[in-house]
Image (cartoon, grey):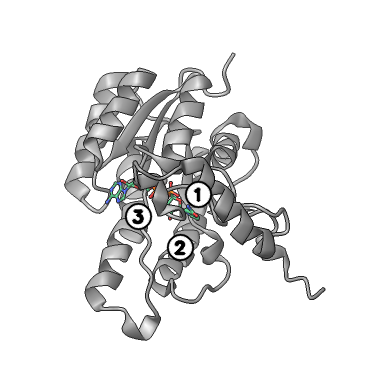
Amino acid sequence: MGKLDGRTIIVTGAARGQGEQEARLFVAEGANVVVADVLDDQGGALAKELGALYVHLDVGSEEDWRAALAAAKEAYGRVDGLVNNAGILRFNSLVDTPLDEFMQVVRVNQVGCFLGMKTVAPEMEDGGTIVNTASYTAVTGMAAVGTYAATKHAILGLTRVAALELAPRGIRVNAMCPGAIDTAMSNPAQLDPEADAEETSRALDGLYRKLVPLGRIGRPQEVARLALFLTSEDSSYITGQPFVIDGGWLAGVSVI
Ligand code: NAD
């Protein structure tokens, strides 16, 4: 028995990184997974490997969302879960951030999460689940990522409101707040075919040893296990909450 047997779950930004690991784990737990991304080659190959469905979905496009939902229902007849995982990061101080860049990040991170819930929730089975991917920067500040932090704070607001509004249908809505996770977002060397991925991960562990109590960067598989918890019956009495998964980073600072 898998923890998601018979359930259909849409995972956005699932072509790589945390979304990919969520798709892999959910399939292993018996779910029909809809791999949604703008990286069609990578997402399509993953879906083929997993026996899942790939859909092209730019999360900032309402039209794409409608088409993705229709494709999921056509393939599997129902939708029981959504993981809003797609996201982008831009580095800039607030005063140097061009409005276009601010709006680009808002469109993917914040509007994408909003449109996902707005489109999918009305057609989701009662008792379904929504997991929104926020961030450590949803609950604290971080210099040079102000736009990103603003959108991730907004995702927590959306999560809480959606949890209240969807609770009468038994739909639970929670958010994950990962610290630094070893994906292309924190480790762009992963996108360089020439780079040694294990070596760059070890270098990042060295950097985070000083910052994070558990002494290393997180792994996308660890976030996928939290997403599974929040998508399965194991979290049946939990809704409207942010879950920090950061190796203790947010706990405080050590002065000695
Ligand atoms: P990643 O860059 O490897 O993955 C992001 C995925 O989102 C990619 O597959 C990308 O193609 C997809 N994507 C980007 N724009 C999209 C769009 N408009 N429509 C659909 N898909 C789109 O990074 P990741 O770490 O796997 O990121 C997953 C989520 O985790 C993001 O929301 C990110 O903000 C969040 N997060 C990451 C970290 C970290 O350190 N890696 C920390 C906290 C939160």
**Numbered disc in front, either 2 or 3:** 2
Type of residue at label 3?
Phe
Local SS, label 2: helix
Residue drawn 45% across and 42% down?
196
Let me know if residue 240 appears in the view: no
The earlier-in-sequence mark between 2 and 3 is: 3
How busy is the neighbourhood of tag 2: few (under 14 within 10 Å), some, or many (20 plus)? many
Residue 137 screen position, x and y as percent: 52, 65
Type of residue at label 1?
Thr
How busy is the neighbourhood of tag 1: few (under 14 within 10 Å), some, or many (20 plus)? some
Q: Residue 100 vs residue 15: left or right? A: left
Identify the residue position indicated by label 1 in the image: 200
**Numbered disc in front, either 3 or 1:** 1
Which numbered dot is residue 152?
2
Let me know if residue 168 appears in the view: yes
6 relative to 220, above or below: above
Q: From the Cβ of disc 2, is ligand 1 less than 8 Å away?
A: yes
- Quarter of the image with the C terminus is bottom right
Residue drawn 24% across and 22% down?
74
Residue 52 screen position, x and y as percent: 34, 22
- How much space separates mark 3 and mark 1, taking CA atoms? 34 Å
Is label 1 in contact with label 2 (beta carbons under 8 Å)? no
Q: Residue furthest left?
A: 63
Which is nearer the eye, 21 or 7?
Answer: 21
- How much space separates mark 1 and mark 2, taking CA atoms? 26 Å
Which numbered dot is residue 114?
3
Type of residue at label 2?
Lys
Which is nearer the eye, 172 or 211?
Answer: 211
**Numbered disc in front, either 1 or 2:** 1
The earlier-in-sequence mark between 1 and 2 is: 2
